[in-house]
Amino acid sequence: MKKMYLSEVQTELDKSIVSHEVFKENDILSLPEPVQRYFVYCGYIGKAKMANAKIVWNDVIFKMRPDKPWIKIKYEQYNFVSEPARLAYIYSTMFGIIPFEGRDRYLNGQGNMLGKLLKKVTVFDVTGTEMDVSAAVTYLSEALLVPTCALQPYIKWEAIDSNHAKASIDYKGVKAEGIVTFNDKGEFTKFETEDRYMDSGGGLLEKHKWTAEGSNYIEKNGIKIPSRLKAIWNLPAGDFEYFNGAITDIVYNKTKIN
């Protein structure tokens, strides 16, 4: 699983073209005002545009179900821009001893979630229309972490008010959208969507409201990034937070895995 993930990442890195262009104020003039404020506040103006990003995670905990306990996981992730793609690798142990690996992939407009025990036993391998839409939504929710994405033709923005903007993605026939919330400083704080599907067990995928939250901004290499991200299902019975992780760094324009 790890070798497969790294091979897929390197293939996408080989396709990434680093332009050496920098963000200019003219690049963001067509964006809604709060999105422009984000670019300025976070320090992207004058910084190099990115073709890809390695998002470095630490202290990540995860829940399989609302009634299950939190478990610690190792989480690795790369996002790509010109052809939108997202690849993530998850490692943990079941009952503290049985190795579990997962690979979350959004590539060529298609989503896939693959999980294996003991490196051989497949416990899930989710594909299909619902997975495609859900993977596109996840990519869209992270567009501002790799903000060249926000300027691509496959992502559109609509103004709402001084603290909200609507973002939508349309790629290879898969469409999804969400509402992005910004605070007065310009920090992205929340992404909410009705377009994501939750695995309710037994192969059943149900559409529920989904929220991603960003907080605790830190500065790295002159750019401010949220150091804490959470993912939450907003279910009729109440909110189910299932992912909570710390981002320690975002490394842009990688050419090799290291």
Image (cartoon, rainbow, N blue to C red):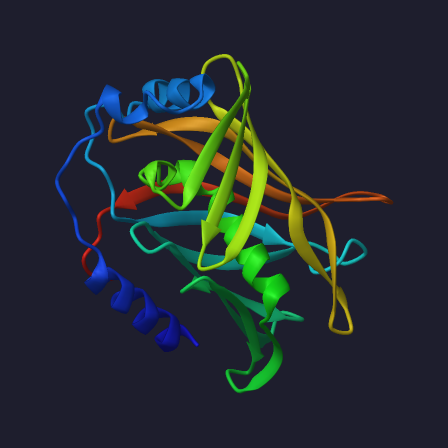
Q: Residue at x 32, y 65 (%)?
A: 9
Query: Where residue 97 sits: x, y (%)?
Result: 60, 75
Is residue 178 left or right of 23 when viewed as pictured? right
Q: Position of residue 195 (x, y in %)?
A: 64, 48
Residue at 40% across, 17% down = 37
| Quarter of the picture holding the N terminus | bottom left
Q: Residue at x 59, y 63 (%)?
A: 131
Pick the quarter of the image with the C terminus.
bottom left
Q: Is residue 258 visible?
A: no
How far across and how far down the image is residue 139, in percent?
47, 49
Compared to 181, does 96 lie above or below?
below
- Placement of 29 over or under 238, stated as above or below: above
Q: Position of residue 100 (x, y in %)?
A: 56, 73
**Location of residue 62 by image quarter:** bottom right
Q: Residue furthest front?
A: 173
- Residue 232: image quadrant is top right
Q: Is residue 211 visible?
A: yes
Residue ranking furthest to the right: 237
In the figure, is residue 50 to the left or right of 230? left
Q: Determine whether, in the image, residue 208 is placed left or right of residue 139.
A: right
